[in-house]
């Protein structure tokens, strides 16, 4: 009888400790992190384990109890999978919110916009020079090409960015649009996406062209379209200008248009 009483007391104490521990964990898990007074960016590198991330977050004064966080994830979040990427933690996030963000795989996105009317050099110069984008050297045909804008200003070689099948010059081969990327993406990957998008659009337009036009390729038609857009910014004038240029080409005349002269002068 005495043994049963002792065991009952021990059981009550154990249940009390479990209740207290659960309340402590639950309160911590859902309470705002007091040190996280401003939004913070955090990058999970490839090959990094959760224990290392939890300790690093504590070092950066984001998480307050890395051990409790690790224990909670291990026992109560069995399906949690840490995803590589760059994440943004809102101010006063709770540990639960931090874990949700790290497991979401929704990495912070940046963007670069190639503006319609820009030439290839101007598009290259729109690539951000900060640390969000990787400018890496590519090996091709025994030569090293650097895809940083400064070097490509001098080179402007399609082979530097893997533009297979393009003309010998990259002009006109990037589709003006807004492109999103994550930290660590390469500049060449953005340029390649813009190039492939342009190939797709150009192929569609070329297949739907009027017959009898004096163009030998889709690229020639693209050059003409660029000249017409530079000649006038008024939409209803473009068909008239296009007609003038087509008739001049059919008569083997010079186009005598300012945009071609201005482009040939470069940055002078």
Image: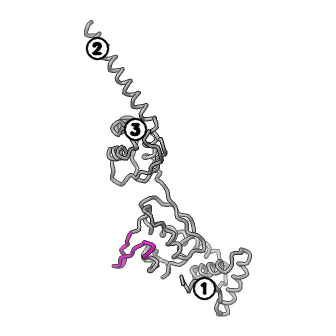
Which residue appears at 43% of the width and 65% of the height? 186
Q: Is residue 111 above or below residue 223?
A: above
Looking at the rendered structure, the secondary structure element under dot 2 is helix
Residue to which mark 2 is pinned? 7
Label 3: how many residues lie within 10 Å, few (<14), some (14-19) or many (20+)?
few
Q: Quadrant of the N terminus?
A: top left
Name the disc covering residue 260, or none. 1
- The crowd level at tag 2 (other Cα within 10 Å; few <14, some 14-19, many 20+) is few
Query: Helix or strand or loop: what does disc 1 sit on?
Result: helix
User: Which residue is drawn at the image coordinates 56% and 64% (left, top)?
Assistant: 178
Q: Which mark is residue 125?
A: none
Find the magenta span and give its range: 136-151
Total marks in image? 3
Residue receiving disc 3 = 77
Question: Marks 1 and 2: which is nearer the front?
Answer: 1
Dots 3, 2 in contact, CB < 8 A: no
């Amino acid at each position: 009888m005495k043994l049963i009483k002792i065991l009952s007391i021990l059981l009550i104490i154990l249940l009390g400790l479990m209740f207290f521990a659960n309340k402590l964990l639950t309160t911590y898990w859902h309470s705002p992190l007091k040190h996280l007074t401003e939004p913070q960016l955090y990058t999970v590198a490839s090959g990094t384990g959760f224990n290392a991330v939890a300790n690093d977050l504590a070092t950066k004064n984001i998480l307050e109890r890395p051990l409790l966080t690790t224990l909670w994830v291990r026992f109560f979040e069995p399906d949690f999978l840490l995803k590589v990427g760059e994440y943004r933690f809102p101010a006063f996030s709770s540990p639960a919110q931090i874990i949700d963000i790290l497991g979401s795989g929704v990495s912070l996105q940046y963007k670069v916009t190639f503006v319609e009317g820009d030439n290839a050099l101007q598009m290259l110069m729109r690539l951000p020079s900060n640390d969000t984008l990787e400018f890496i050297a590519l090996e091709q045909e025994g030569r090293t090409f650097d895809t940083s804008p400064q070097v490509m200003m001098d080179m402007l070689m399609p082979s530097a960015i893997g533009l297979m099948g393009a003309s010998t010059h990259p002009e006109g081969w990037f589709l003006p649009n807004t492109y999103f990327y994550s930290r660590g993406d390469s500049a060449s990957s953005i340029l390649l996406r813009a190039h492939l998008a342009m190939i797709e659009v150009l192929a569609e337009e070329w297949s739907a062209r009027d017959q009898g036009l004096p163009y030998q390729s889709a690229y020639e038609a693209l050059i003409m379209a660029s000249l017409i857009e530079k000649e006038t910014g008024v939409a209803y004038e473009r068909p008239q200008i296009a007609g003038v240029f087509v008739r001049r080409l059919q008569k083997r005349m010079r186009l005598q248009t300012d945009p071609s002269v201005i482009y040939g002068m470069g940055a002078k």
